[in-house]
């Protein structure tokens, strides 16, 4: 910034004068742009925090569902093994009856 020489030197220290090439429009536009950037940055941080919170919640749900799936798989394996044992006994009985005849 240049200091205007319109006023005598003793008054220059009391007042700040802008270069005539810089208008108030430029200053206001710059301030508005900086304000907009700060608001957008704050809004982005808020949305990011919201997404992180939702992600943590989804991770908990996925972990619970995986635990239930593992339990169901173990139970299903037990049922299949039980059926397999019954089939083996049934086949043995059928073959022993066939050998008796």
Image (cartoon, rainbow, N blue to C red):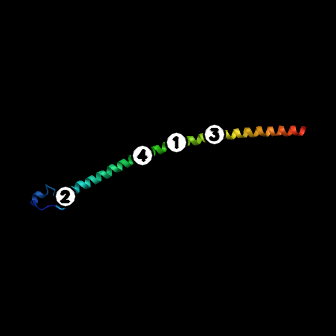
Callout 2 secondary element? loop
Q: Which residue is mark 3?
A: 72
Residue to which mark 1 is pinned: 60
Can you tell which mark lies on residue 19? none
Q: Is residue 12 above or below residue 94?
A: below
For the residues labelled 4 and 2, say whether their Cβ atoms are less than 8 Å apart. Answer: no
Q: Residue furthest right?
A: 101
The tag on residue 49 is 4
Question: On the picture, is 65 further left or further right than 14?
Answer: right
- Judged from the image, the secondary structure of the residue bearing numbered disc 1 is helix
CA gap between label 3 and label 4 equals 35 Å
**Disc 3 element:** helix
Identify the residue position indicated by label 2 in the image: 23
Q: Nearer the viewer, residue 101 or 93?
A: 101
Q: What is the CA distance from the residue labelled 4 to the residue labelled 1?
A: 17 Å
Check whether the beta carbons of the residues at disc 3 and disc 4 lie within 8 A of each other.
no
Give the crowd class for mark 2: few <14, some 14-19, many >=20 residues within 10 Å.
few
Determine whether label 3 and label 1 are within 8 Å by CB: no
From mark 3 to mark 1, how far is it between C-alphas? Answer: 18 Å
Q: Is residue 35 left or right of residue 51?
A: left
Instruction: Mark 3: give few (<14), some (14-19) or many (20+) Cα within 10 Å.
Output: few
Q: Position of residue 52 (x, y in %)?
A: 45, 46
Residue farthest toward the left in the current orientation of the protein: 8
Mark 4, secondary structure of its residue = helix
Residue at the image point whose x is 66% and y is 38% from the top? 75
Q: Nearer the viewer, mark 3 or mark 4?
A: 3
Tag 3 or tag 2, which sits nearer the N-term?
Answer: 2
């Amino acid at each position: 910034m240049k200091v205007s020489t319109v006023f005598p030197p003793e008054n220059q220290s009391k007042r700040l004068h802008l270069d005539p090439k810089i208008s108030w429009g430029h200053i206001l536009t710059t301030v508005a742009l900086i304000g907009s950037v700060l608001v957008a940055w704050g809004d982005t941080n808020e949305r990011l925090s919201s997404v992180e919170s939702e992600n943590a919640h989804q991770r908990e749900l996925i972990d619970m569902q995986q635990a239930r799936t593992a339990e169901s798989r173990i139970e299903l394996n037990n049922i299949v093994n039980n059926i397999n044992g019954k089939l083996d006994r049934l086949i043995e009985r059928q073959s022993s009856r066939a050998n008796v005849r």
